[in-house]
Image: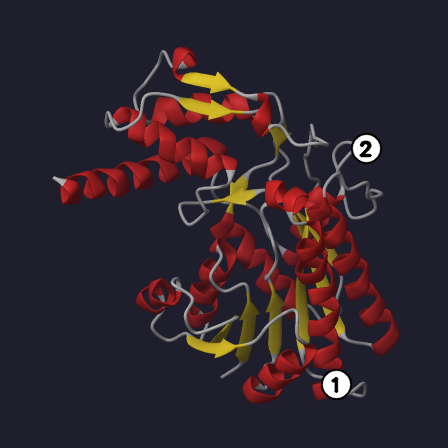
Amino acid sequence: MPRALITGITGQDGRHLAQLLVGKGYDVYGMVRGQNNPKIHILQDETPELEIVEGDLQDLSSLIGVVEQVQPDEVYNLGAISFVALSFRQPELTADITGVGVLRMLEAIRVVGGTQDNRIRFYQASSSEMFGKVRETPQNEMTPFHPRSPYGTAKVFGHYTTLNYRESYGLHASSGILFNHEGFRRGLEFVTRKVTNAVARIKLGLQDTLTLGNLEASRDWGYAGDYVEAMWRMVQQDEPGDYVVATGETHTIRDLLEAAFQAAGIDDWQALVQTDPRFTRPAEVDLLIGDASKAREVLGWQPTVDFPTLIKMMVDHDLEVEARKARQVQ
């Protein structure tokens, strides 16, 4: 059975990827920083076959130890400080984990596997936030980067470090430049889940209004369950490479609100939404839309869940969760 090691296992992508790989017959190991992580029990409930191992993207020696322990065929580096707004408040920590953490993991793979015939295949979770102030629309693998946040800047470092290890040491190291991908496992701090959860609470009479920042920012939103399939397909290729993964459609935050309230059966929603400049980033990314032609042609990948279905899926989940919480309080 092939073995896979996943960093960032407690995030939405890690949880989706673990289930995908277990379903494909893998032994899957998820790396956490410490065994007191409160999300471990959720992981074990969702995917009982998953094995938890300890490691830290800020500590090279611990990563070498994990790679030696697991002896993986594939390493998926999803670990990062991934909330863009937080990266402005903690830029140094973001650079160390999201950026330099990639270098440490690649170095651990190089040290354990050696430079000759290293069988370990590596996937790096790059991001559309690297494009930032976009130079062209839509964005593809050749579009220049102009990141607009510490998170985006750290991701650029990790992306080029992956390329450098591929060219310098011959590692099978690929990067997926993933555009925004969401689902009901998304954290509440992210705008999509913030919206769907608030809409559910408003529908249930548990909340009166929703406050957001820039309603005109546009993103290319897909379903996380589709995107982890693209990750796996990259790692299976004979030759490593970089791939944009996106739907090729863009929607504004206002479109997101329209879809979420419609899914909850609320037509007149404008008075329920307020804006506050405190939720606006110091440097905003206004428009992201990806060209995933290479992923379609080389990987045979394409999204299966469209935008309205994705948002309805999230709203339905949050309605169920919030209704259950309300019953427990009563």
**Which of the 4 quarters of the picture holds residue 78?**
bottom right
| Residue located beneath label 1 in the image | 111
Secondary structure under the numbered disc 2 in the rendered image:
loop
Residue 113: image location, x then y, percent = 71, 86
Secondary structure under the numbered disc 1 in the rendered image:
helix
- Quick one: 189 or 267, which is closer to the camera? 189
Residue 238: image location, x then y, percent = 72, 71
- Residue 26 visible in the picture: no
- Quick one: 273 or 239, which is closer to the camera? 273
- For the residue carrying disc 2, how many other residues have a C-alpha within 10 Å: few (<14), some (14-19), or many (20+)? few
Q: Is residue 83 left or right of residue 201?
A: right
Residue at 76% over, 62% down = 241
Q: Is residue 84 left or right of residue 195?
A: right
Residue at 78% over, 33% down = 133
CA gap between label 1 and label 2 equals 39 Å
Give the total number of marks visible in the rendering. 2
Mark 1 vs mark 2, foreground winner is: 1
Q: Is residue 30 left or right of residue 85?
A: left
Question: What type is the residue that disc 2 sits on?
Answer: Glu
Question: What type is the residue that disc 1 sits on?
Answer: Val
Residue 136's mark? 2
